[in-house]
Image: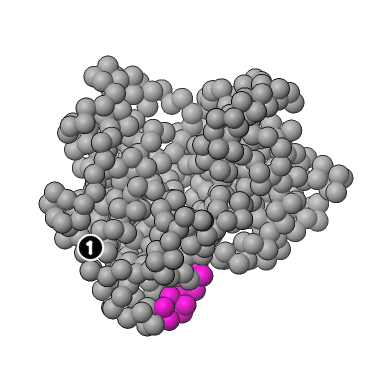
Amino acid sequence: MKTEKSHKLFERAKNVIPGGVNSPVRAFRAVGGNPLFIKRAEGAYLIDEDDNKYIELINSWGPMILGHANTDIENAVCEAVKDSLSFGAPGEREVFMAELITTMIPSIEKVRMVSSGTEATMAAVRLARGYTNRAKIIKFEGCYHGHGDSFLIAAGSGAITLGVPDSPGVTQGVANDTLTAPFNNLKAVQDLAAANKGQIAAIIIEPVAGNMGLVVPETGFLQGLRTLCDNEGIVLIFDEVMTGFRLSKGGAQQILNVKPDITTLGKIIGGGMPVGAYGGKKEIMDFVSPAGPVYQAGTLSGNPVAMAAGLAMLNYLNTHPEVYTHLENITARICEGFEKNLKELGIKGTVNKIGSMFTLFFTDQKVKDFETAKTSDTALFGRYFRAMLEEGVYLAPSQYESLFISTAITEELAEKIVNANYKALKAVLQNA
């Protein structure tokens, strides 16, 4: 596999971009080697600057649920571009998007568009604080809600692999207002609420965690949070930036049957374009300026091109529910193949999955929270990642990330992925 062009670009990038990348996990620091620079993508494939072609399981970290270069989405973007890239004023697509979101996710009665998932979670927490007139929030160890100061306490995703979950630049005052609990530990949350009675504005959680690797909530956990929030006047925020419209038309909350007060969205609602949103109960959302006193604004919020791409995506998903059955079947087939390979080769590993998301952890423990996720053999994962690249499969360059399946992954490609997994695992054993 030739990587000369990617290597040269990385060397150039390091001179003008911190670390040579515009998001830390892209640097390949957690898996070794240099990042590959991608030239284009189509369907289930990424093609790098050296013309290497990979079956890919990241899908731009989730939004490419219909695969890359989807014709409907590209056509919608091309039509929108003809009318200008941005207005800085209201447009009809924003209204159509808001109406569609509120139709697909029953817990959302009103929604505000923003430009990223981080912006959505920051605004949601500010809204919860303004609505309750309280300062503290509870988040969960290993859950990543973007790079807002309030969230970089026991954070997941790239913050884990860089070894700096508590980032310099986050003040002690902010840290004091952020309480953390283990994922799937309802008793710990109840104890925090009791110790800080009347002070907690919000509990924010990924209902299905994807940023310490994929971790599914245990039975009763989310329901227990809902009851606690109802009893204590706490705003329950579901961060569905990753899971919204991916696990079902109504997101994780639909399949898990728990309604939050506020939901944050991103990824898929932009069809691949930068976008985010937060929405929820009318009585809470009406606290957002200009309807209410909680200020939040954004020049590119509701960008017409992003709205066009997102509308094409959501309209397709809304009218083709069979997509989710297909994705779940393909994902199950891949995960079953991975589990069979691990067993046959005698490698310690566990596979967590739900819908079209999954993670292979290199640990023999059941992964149910941040602490069990950290028992994974990250050095082994690094070798496995590089071996999979050699087999033509591009994975997330971190043990602590979820993988995502798109509709472009056919049964034939699923079989290729499973076979590549076997060869990569065997190569790792032989070179240990």
Tell me the quadrant of the picture where the N terminus can be found.
Answer: top right
- Look at the image and give the residue range highlighted in magenta: 182-192
Taking the spot 41% from the left edge, 78% from the top edge, the residue there is 192
Q: Where 150 sits versus 431, above or below?
A: below
Q: Residue at x 13, y 49 (%)?
A: 290
Please state which of residues 373 and 87 is positioned toward the viewer in this rendering: 87
Q: Which residue is mark 1?
A: 130
Residue at the (47%, 65%) spot, across then down: 140
The location of residue 295, given as percent across then percent down, is 21, 52
Q: Main secondary structure of the magenta part?
A: helix
Query: Looking at the image, which residue sits at the far top?
Result: 82
Q: Which kind of residue does numbered mark 1 sit on?
A: Gly
The image's colouring method is one colour
Q: Is residue 405 above or below residue 305?
A: below
For residue 5, say whether it is visible.
Answer: yes
Q: Is residue 189 magenta?
A: yes
* Residue 220, image x, y percentages: 43, 72
Question: Residue 58, percent across and down?
Answer: 55, 39
